[in-house]
Image (tube, helix red, strand yellow):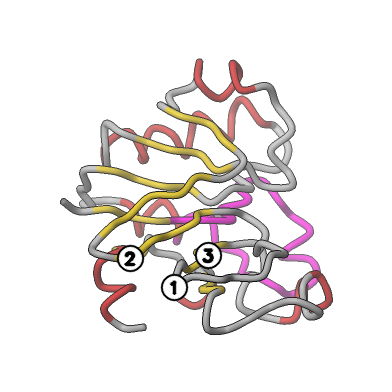
Amino acid sequence: MKILITTDTHIGHQKLIDKGYRPKDFEDKIISGLKGQRADLLIHLGDVVMGEDNMNHLRLMRELMTVSHRRVLVRGNHDKKSDKWYLDRGWGMVCDCFMNTYFGKDIIFTHVPLDVEFDSAAINIHGHLHGNDHRDDDCKDYYNEDHHKQIALENTDYKPVDLKKFLDNL
């Protein structure tokens, strides 16, 4: 089973460019990184679009639909529409978080890193932090690198991450 993860696509979010967090062509890089990808499941860890939601969501979803027929959206802090809005636009499941076992690992998928004490070997795969100082202070008081594992498009050349390969590299 092939599972791809993406996060924080922020299609339409000009402020990320203006503040120097992302290059001017980051949206094109995201779309290009999806072309030719195929998976049994695609998990998006939130913050799909920012502004002109209908148009920008349609642009991204056209590519995501070619990647996988099964798509899960884990709501991010900017994903404010109703579940119905997202489901009507092609997501198979919309949630705040979910847990499952993949490739022998118990994984909790969230957008923002979980503020919990881990009493098991479970890992929390999350987005939100962008792999830079954009959100440094959001979770510094509880972040535990043994359990929190970040996906950041800024660190993957704006391409989705293969979950099995990601886990193999932990």
Q: Is residue 42 above or below residue 155?
A: above
Residue type, label 1: Ala
Residue 15 among magenta residues: yes
SS at mark 2 in the image: strand
Which residue is the extreme one toward the left? Answer: 1
Quarter occupied by residue 142:
bottom right
Residue that carries the numbered disc 1 in the rendered image? 121
Instruction: Tell me: 134 left or right of 32.
Output: right
Q: Which residue is mark 3?
A: 124
In the rendered image, residue 80, in percent from the top left (x then y), is placed at 74, 33
Q: Residues within 10 Å of mark 3 (few under 14, many from 20)?
A: many
Residue 115, percent from left and from top: 72, 64
**In which quadrant is the C terminus drawn?**
bottom left
Q: Which residue is mark 2?
A: 105
Query: Of helix, strand and loop, which one carries label 1?
Result: loop
Q: Which span is picked out in magenta?
A: 6-29
